[in-house]
Structures are given as structure tokens and as C-alpha cells.
Image: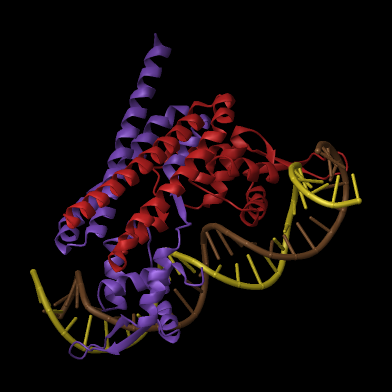
Chain colours: A purple, B red, C yellow, D brown
Amino acid sequence: MELSATGRVILGMLAIRPQSGYEIKSLVDDSTRFFWAASYGQIYPELHRLADAGLIEGRSRPQGGRKRTVYRLTRGGRRELRAWLERPAEVLELRDEGLLQLFFSGARPEGARDVLEGKRALHVEKLERLREIEPAVKGAGDPFCHMVLRYGIAMSEFSIGWCEQAIDELSEQEKRRAA
Amino acid sequence: MELSATGRVILGMLAIRPQSGYEIKSLVDDSTRFFWAASYGQIYPELHRLADAGLIEGRSRPQGGRKRTVYRLTRGGRRELRAWLERPAEVLELRDEGLLQLFFSGARPEGARDVLEGKRALHVEKLERLREIEPAVKGAGDPFCHMVLRYGIAMSEFSIGWCEQAIDELSEQEKRRAA
DNA sequence: TATACCATGTAACTTGTTACATGATTTG
DNA sequence: CAAATCATGTAACAAGTTACATGGTATA
């Protein structure tokens, strides 16, 4: 994995269309952020590294008096991107604070219901944001981007349903204990 | 969020039972790792910080000539843990390289099927590991730990099914294009 | 007796976030 | 004219991984 994660995101974004660092960051924020984020502190230095490595090239394209560099893939960059797309993915990581709270709820069982409600709320929030961007993604006409978005939506719906079911389970257990 | 993520994991693990840093790491590796990992490089320094803050206390409990420190929660540590369990969770992050590859598959459409197969394989691998630990978790008798494991299993099954469906969709599209 | 495991720890490194600085342009 | 947005960048920090060092014990 000689190409960094951020490097791969940038190459992928530039394959969609040539753009500036600022535009890449905006696009990441309304798309891959949900499964792969990147900040300015990563993007700008990585753009320079990729340019030094000859995988991308930047051209000055000022907008009025506002300076601006638009990058595009070189042949080598496109080759590198395609090579990564051929390699099987390795990273599949989750950081879910709600799940951690549920895991430790033996230390505070009376709060388990709220923990599940909280987890549900996070998934609802995420689902809303995914639905917001759906028209734009669908309109862009890339079937793969849309597929990924649909996965995110389906996954969020699944998690919401699971939380609701788990809340019901807790309620039934409480009823049984009360009886 | 004054308490670090690793600190919360440690407090939670010590609420289950007093244990050494090594045991905490092992337990993390067979349980929370799937949604919250921690390495020795985080655990040992954090144990010292938590002890300095008075949230846990360590006692020397050597096994033969092998020195060993077992930590347990103090009253303050238990209070801190419960306080965190009361606060709504904020972190819900995913890093999914396969999804990133699918997102950028417009740059190499002929590989999309393999990308989905690769993503499916990662979920299958994860599911297998979750099923391996299920008997132990079920046997431990903590309903919340088991609930979390069931979530992981259900989620993996969902993802596997989604990948298979997406692969079928691609096949149908190919057929339609061929016709 | 070699390998695996128990046990603790640190140093170097990589990754990633946040906050800040700078300055132009557009919009309400 | 203030606020939002476009645009680029860096420094300080936080988080996390990996590799290494040390040394005891159990097991094949």
C-alpha cells in the first residue's frame, strides 16, 4: 500500500473530473465522508506529494483575483488508480460509540434503552444527510456512486430498525420482570 | 469529552471484572475490536493516566515469578463510567475501502464485480470471526454484550446480502447490454 | 528446547483533526 | 457592509499502530 488512503481518495476524485483542492474537500464532504473522510490538513500536503510523484499535475486557473490550482490525473496517476482498484480492499473498520456504550451497559442497565435511542438518533441523522444528497448523486449519473449511496441508505435503515427492535426487546424483558 | 476513547474502553472493561492490561487487550481483541480497537501503545499509558486521576487502582498480583498488575475501578472511576454511559454517543464512523473502490469504479467499470466480491469476502471473514466468539459471549451471560454481538452478526449478514444483490444487478445490466 | 503465551512498557512513526492565518469574491 | 463562500496552506495537537525490548511460564 505505497499510495496513502488520502492519496487514493484524491486520485479517485480527480478521475471524476479535474478540480482544485478546495473542490475535492467539498466533494468528499458530500460523498465519501460517510465511509472515508479527509481534511484540508491531509488534502493539500498530499496534493503536493502526488504532484511530486508525477501522478497528478496542477495548473493555475485563477478565478478573478482569486488564485486557484486545478489538478488532473496524469497517465501514471490513472494507472495507479486503476492498479489500486484491482487490488482487493483490506480496510473495513467501524468506530461506533453507541455500540461501545451498549456493550458496557451491564454497568448501568437502566440506561440501556437511552443508549439504544441515542444510537438510533445517530443513524437517523446520518440517513437524513444521505437522503439530502441523493438527488444530486442520482443526477450526476454515475451508477457506482449511486450504488454506494444506496448502500449507505440501506445500512442506516437497517441499523434504525435493529435499534427499534432491540428497544422493544428491552421493553418486553421489563414487562416480564415486572410480572 | 475529557475522558479519552481508550480510557472509556478501559473503564468499561474493568467494570466487567478487575484485570491486567494484558487481559484488557485480549478481551478487546475478542470483543470490542469490531467496533472499537485499542493497542498496547494506548492501553498501558492510559492505565497509568487513569490511575493518576484516581479512576482506577492497580495492585500487584504476580503469577509465579511473573509480575502482574491487576487494576480495578475506584468509586470515582465507576461514577465516570456511568456518567459517560448517560451522555449521548457522538462518534459513528466507518472506514470501508471496498466502498471507496466501488465509489470510484467509474474509472474501471470492468472491475466493479471483483470489487463487490472483495467487499463481500471481507464481510464474510468478519462474520466468521464473530460467529467464532459467539459461544463464549453467550456463555458469559451478559445480555448487552450478546446484543452487540448479534448486531455485528446481523450487520455482516446484511452487507453480504447487499453485495450479492449488487453483483446480480451488475450481471443483469451486462446481459441487457449484450442483448 | 523451541514455541507460544503471559506481562509490561516505550519509541518512532503515521494518520488525522483542529485551529489558525491569509486574502479574494459573492451574496444578503 | 457583514457574512458566507472560495481558496490555500501550516502548526500544534491528538490518536493510533508497529516494532521492539525485556523477561517469566507453560506446553508440545
Q: Residue at x 36, y 52 (%)?
A: B116
> Total marks drawn?
0
Is A122 located above or below residue A107 in the figure?
below
From the top left corner, tell me how far across and down residue B43 is, in percent. Answer: 63, 51
Q: Is residue A98 visible?
A: yes
Asked if C5 appears above or below D13 in the picture, the reply is above
Image x and y of residue D3, in percent: 19, 70
In the rendered view, would you say A39 is above or below A95? below
* In the foreground, A141 or A44: A141
Can I make out residue A108 in this image? no
Q: Quadrant of residue A171?
A: top left
**Quarter of the rendering occupied by the C terminus of chain B:** bottom left
A121 with respect to A42 (left or right): left
Q: Look at 36% across and 39% down and name the residue there.
A: B158
Is B68 in front, or is B175?
Answer: B175
User: Who's the residue at 63% across and 49% down the image?
Assistant: B50
Coordinates of residue B17 in the picture (x, y in percent): 64, 33
Decide which of A178, A133 is in the foreground and name it: A133
The percent coordinates of residue A170 (x first, y second) are: 39, 23
Q: Residue furthest front?
A: B179
* Frontmost residue, B16 versus A6: A6
Judged left or right of residue B68, residue B48 is left
